[in-house]
Image (cartoon, helix red, strand yellow):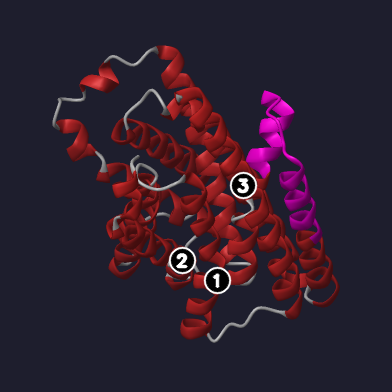
């Protein structure tokens, strides 16, 4: 990355598109027929998402996939299973609690990346990161306590959203080292395919109805694959090549705000006072954690490159 890349408007513009695209994820889930199981929704979404990368792999006749070591395939398969479970819990949470609470708790995954990195990989956690993590968990506790006391019906949905955040943290942490040696199309195709298989297995295990699906809902599944996945996550990954990691990481915090505004517009859904207070504290904590963690990593990278 050079100064000209960082000052270019295109990476920033791509981040704006990505933030809007990702914010639509929960909205698309709400638009799906309520009689369709969240596991079926996730299975179709990830199946279509995996199809997106096939044309990129066909360019070199799947040569990279053919040369992958069995260890790498096994590792990616495990990461794909975790991603499938993440989507299963997240999509379920959106149907059971408010969009604001679901997206907020699912977005807490940077905390778990840092926590599990410290616990499992013995990575150093700065004092600022520790403060950020503590603040975030206080915010989550406030959100859970208030919702549990006054809106007990959403407690399971909030729990599912938090579990999806934990699983996302494991997914990002586990995939971090694998991704560095494998191209994005190959990595995404295998990960998304395994996540789809995981969800389809869950669909069959729970005897959920997966066929026939109305054309309208098939269209929504396709939108989920193209908008939040392709325009959202892919543009985020592309921007990482041109902008500092902490700038790209912090934009992930836009999802709860964007999704909440869209839910207010489309569903007349306003977050409770407990989600607002707890969520604000949680987001401040995540912001502190992301900034301190990313700047620390870039300092280490600069020292190593010099």
Q: In the rendered structure, which segment of residues is drawn in magenta?
A: 112-138
**Residue 86: x and y, percent?**
56, 46
Q: Nearer the viewer, mark 1 or mark 2?
A: 1
Secondary structure under the numbered disc 1 in the rendered image: helix
Measured in 3D between alpha carbons, the distance from the residue under mark 2 to the one under mark 3, in whole angstroms, is: 17 Å
Disc sitting over residue 23 in the figure: 2
Q: Nearer the viewer, mark 2 or mark 3?
A: 3
The secondary structure that dominates the magenta segment is helix
**Residue at the spot of label 3:** 110
Q: Is residue 72 left or right of residue 280?
A: left
Q: Nearer the viewer, residue 90 or 64?
A: 64
Q: Is residue 110 left or right of residue 241?
A: right
Q: Earlier in the sequence, mark 1 or mark 3?
A: 3
Q: Residue at x 65, y 67 (%)?
A: 101
Quadrant occupied by the N terminus: top left
| In the image: residue 134, left or right of residue 29 | right
Distance Cα–Cα, label 1 vs label 2: 8 Å
Q: Label 2, secondary structure: give it.
A: helix
Q: Position of residue 231 (x, y in %)?
A: 32, 56
User: Does residue 150 sit above or below 301 in this rendering?
Assistant: below
Identify which residue, 214 or 95, lies in the foreground: 95
Residue at the farthest front position? 306
Are the two marked residues, 1 and 3, in contact with CB atoms closer than 8 angstroms? Answer: no
Label 2 crowd bin: few (<14), some (14–19), many (20+), radius 10 Å: many
Identify the residue position indicated by label 1 in the image: 257
Q: Is residue 304 above or below residue 96?
A: above
Q: Which comes before the other along the chain, label 1 or label 2? A: 2
Q: Earlier in the sequence, mark 2 or mark 3?
A: 2
């Amino acid at each position: 990355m050079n100064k000209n890349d960082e000052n270019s408007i295109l990476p920033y513009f791509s981040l704006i598109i990505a933030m809007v695209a990702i914010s639509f994820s929960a909205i698309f889930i709400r638009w799906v027929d309520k009689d369709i199981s969240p596991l079926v929704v996730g299975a179709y979404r990830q199946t279509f998402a995996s199809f997106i990368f096939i044309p990129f792999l066909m360019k070199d006749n799947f040569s990279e996939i053919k040369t992958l070591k069995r260890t790498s395939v096994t590792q990616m398969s495990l990461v794909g299973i975790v991603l499938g479970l993440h989507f299963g819990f997240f999509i379920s949470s959106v149907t059971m609690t408010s969009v604001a609470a679901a997206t907020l708790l699912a977005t807490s995954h940077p905390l778990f990346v840092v926590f599990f990195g410290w616990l499992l990989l013995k990575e150093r956690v700065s004092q600022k990161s520790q403060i950020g993590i503590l603040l975030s968990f206080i915010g989550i506790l406030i959100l859970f306590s208030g919702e549990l006391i006054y809106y007990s019906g959403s407690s399971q949905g909030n729990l599912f959203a938090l579990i999806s955040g934990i699983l996302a943290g494991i997914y990002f942490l586990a995939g971090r080292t694998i991704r560095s040696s494998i191209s994005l199309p190959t990595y995404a195709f295998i990960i998304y395919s395994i996540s789809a298989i995981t969800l389809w297995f869950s669909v069959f295990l729970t005897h959920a109805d997966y066929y026939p699906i109305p054309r309208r809902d098939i269209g929504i599944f396709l939108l989920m694959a193209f908008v939040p996945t392709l325009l959202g996550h892919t543009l985020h990954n592309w921007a990482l090549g041109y902008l500092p990691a902490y700038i790209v990481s912090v934009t992930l915090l836009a999802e709860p705000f964007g999704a909440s505004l869209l839910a207010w517009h489309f569903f007349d859904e306003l977050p409770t006072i407990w989600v607002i207070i707890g969520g604000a504290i949680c987001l401040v904590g995540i912001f502190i954690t992301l900034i301190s963690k990313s700047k620390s990593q870039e300092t280490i990278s600069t020292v190593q490159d010099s």
